[in-house]
Amino acid sequence: MVSLKPRILIVEDNAGDLFLVKEFLKRTSLPDFEILHAASLTQAIILLKTNTFRLILLDLFLTDSEGLETFERVYPLSSSAPVIVLTGLIDENITAETLKKGAQDYLLKGRYDKNLLEKTIRYAIERKQNQQLLKQSEEEYKLLFENNPVPMWAYDIKTQRILMVNASAILYYGICRDEFSSLTIQDILPPEGVRESLETNGLHKTGPWRYKRKDNSVLYTEIVSHDIRLGGIESRIVAVYDVTERTKVEGYLRLLESVITNANDAVLVTEAQSVDAEGPCIVYVNEAFTTMTGYSADEVMGKTPRILQGPKTDRTELRRIREALLKQETIEVEIINYKRNGDEYWANFTIVPVGDKDGILTHFVAIQRDVTARKRQEEMIREKLERQVKERTRELNEALSKEKELVELKSKFVAIASHEFRTPLATINFAANYLRDYLDKLQPSDIVKKLESIEKQVKHMTFLLDDVLTLGKSESGKTKVVARKIDIHDFFKKIVEEVLYSTKSTHTVMFTFDSEVREVKIDEKLLRNVFINLLSNAIKFSPESSEVSLSVRAENGQLRISVTDKGVGIPANEFDKIFDPFHRGSNAGAIQGSGLGLSIVKKAVELLEGELNFKSEIGKGSEFTVGLKISA
C-alpha cells in the first residue's frame, strides 16, 4: 500500500546516531513522517531516484563517501527537499562550503536535543520553500521582461549606460543586443527626453516624443519609467509605447473637431484599440454629448464608453456592438444608458469605424440621440397590449379549466352513476321478478321485506340524484342563499333524528348544545345539507354500535359545530382531495357512497360564508368543525 505520509530520508551509517535521530523525531510536534534510511551513499542515491522526500538528514562521512563529496553527490538529487547536514566534526570549512552549495543548516552530533532538531527542521523547510518561491519569482519576472510585447530596457541612473534590453525593444529600435550594451540613453532618446528622464524620480510618464529609428523612420513614443535596483545598481526600467499613429490621428481629429463641435446629436470618438479588453479609449466628445449625459469632456477623456452603461443596459446589444467593432462594421443600436447623476435614458446611436488613408482602422465614431420620449410611448403601448393579451389569456385559461373540470366531472359522474345505479336497479329488478314469479306462494311478511328492499334502493338513488343536482347548482352559481330565523337547537335535534331514521343505524349520536343564542338567521336548507352529509358520513364510516358526537357551542361571536366519529379515518396523503367531487377514500372499501357528500358540504359552507376545518387519523376517526358567524 502506498504511504501518503511525507518522507524523511536519513543517510547515516552509525546505528546509535540513527536511533537517536529517530527517537527525537518521535518526540517532536512535527507532522507524522515516514522515515527511510540509507547506510551508504549508494543506497541513498537509489532511494533519492525512486522517492520524493520532504527532508534529508545527511551524514557527510559514510563508508563509501566522505566530506564535501557526499553532499555534492546527494544535493543534485534532493529536488525540493531541504538538506540538513549531520556532522560529528567541527570543521568550519566543510560546514561553510555545504551551506554555500545549498545545505539549509547543520547539526553537530551529540550536541542537539529534540527541541533544536524540531526548530532546525521547521526553519530548513520554510527557508527551502522561500528559496524556491524566490527562484520561481525571479524566473517569472525575467520571462515577463524578456517576452513582454512592449519594448523595455533598463539603465544605470548614475552612468546612463543601458544595462539590459528585451526582444521587443531590439525589434522596435532596430538595434541588436550587443550594440545596445554599448549605448547610453542619449543614444536612443531625443535631447528633451534625456533631460526629462534625468530630472524625474520614481514612476513617471513622459512624451510623446518625436525621433528617428536607426533606419531613419519617424517614431512618436511615450515612456513610462520606474526606479529599481538591479544587481546592487540604482537603475531605472523603461517601457516604451508607440503612439505614432495615435499622434497622427489626433492631428487629423483636431481638423474635424470644428465640424462636429456644434452638432445637435452627441458625438463620441474612441481609439480603435482595446475593443477586446477594457474597452476603447475616448479621445473626443462634443458639447451635445456633455449636455445629454452630464459628463464634461475632461471627465470622460481617456475612459471608455462603458461609463455610460449600468444595470439595465442590454448585455445582448452590448455583445452585438462588440462583435461589430471586432469585425470593423457599422452598427446601429438602441440601449439604456446612464447619465452622470444616475438617470436612465434611451440612446439610439450609430457606430462607424474610421480608418487612415491606408485603410487601417484607427477610431470609432459614435453618433448618439436621446430617444427616451419615444421609447416611453412605445413602452406604454406595449404594456397596454400585454395587459390585454394577459387578460384574454387568463379568460381563455379559466374557460379551458372550467371545460376540463366539467369533462372530468361528467366522466366521474358516468362512472359513479353506472356503479351506484346498477346495484340498486339490479336489487329492484330481482325483487320485482321474485314477487311476480312467487307472489301466490309468498307469506305477507316476505312480500313486505321485498317491498322494503325496493323502497330502500329507490331512496338510495333519490339521494344520489339530489346530491348531483345540489352540487351542479352550486358549481353553476345558481344556488341562492335565503336566510331566515331558525331555532338552532331544535334544528340540530331534528337533524339527528332524521339521520338516525334514514340510516336505520344502531349508532348512538351524542348531541351537546352549549350556546345562549338559540335563534340565528341562516339558510336552513344549506345548513341541513352540511350536517346531514357530515352526520351520515360519520355513521357510515364508523363501526356499528359506536358513538358519533355532534356538539354546538358559541365561541367568539361564532357558532362552532363539530361532528366527531371513531371510524376508519382519512389517509393523510388524501387530505387535499377529500372535497373534490366524486372522490372516495382509498380505504372506503365496500362502504357505499357517491363521493359527493363532502363536496356539497364545502360548497354549502362557502355559500354560508363560514369556515370548514377537519382533522383525522387512520383507525381513530375524524372530526369536522364548521364555524358560522352568529347573525340574529
Image: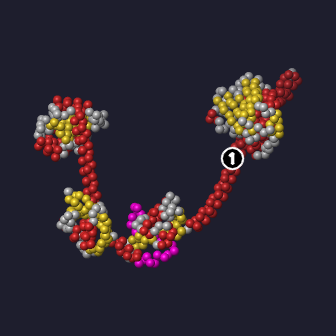
Would residue 60 be found to the left or right of residue 521 on screen? left
Q: Quadrant of residue 514?
A: top right
Q: How is the image coloured?
A: secondary structure
Would residue 356 be found to the left or right of residue 388 on screen? left
Q: Quadrant of residue 206?
A: bottom left
User: From the viewer's perspective, is residue 473 above or below residue 506?
Assistant: below
556 part of magenta stretch: no
On the question of residue 406 being in view, the answer is yes
Q: Tell which of 455 and 106 is nearer to you.
A: 106
Which residue range is magenta in the image? 255-279
Looking at the rendering, in which quadrant would you find the C terminus? top right
Residue type at mark 1: give it.
Lys
Point out residue 598 in the picture as x, y percentages from the top left corner. Answer: 72, 36
- Identify which residue is drawn at 75% across, 38% down: 629
278 part of magenta stretch: yes
Q: How many marks?
A: 1
Point out residue 163 in the picture as x, y percentages from the top left corner. Answer: 21, 62
Q: Tell which of 620 and 235 is nearer to you.
A: 235
User: From the viewer's perspective, is residue 309 above or below residue 28?
Assistant: below
Q: Quadrant of residue 152?
A: bottom left
- Identify which residue is drawn at 80% across, 37% down: 520
Q: Tell which of 490 and 39 is nearer to you.
A: 490
Q: Tell which of 365 and 69 is nearer to you.
A: 365
Instruction: Kindly identify which residue carries mark 1.
Output: 404
Point out residue 462 in the picture as x, y percentages from the top left corner. Answer: 80, 35
- Identify which residue is drawn at 64% across, 35% down: 574
Q: Secondary structure at mark 1?
A: helix
Would residue 356 be found to the left or right of residue 590 on screen? left
Would residue 67 be found to the left or right of residue 163 on screen? left
Point out residue 387 in the picture as x, y percentages from the top left corner. Answer: 65, 57
Looking at the rendering, in which quadrant would you find the N terminus? top left
- Identify which residue is drawn at 45% across, 63% down: 306
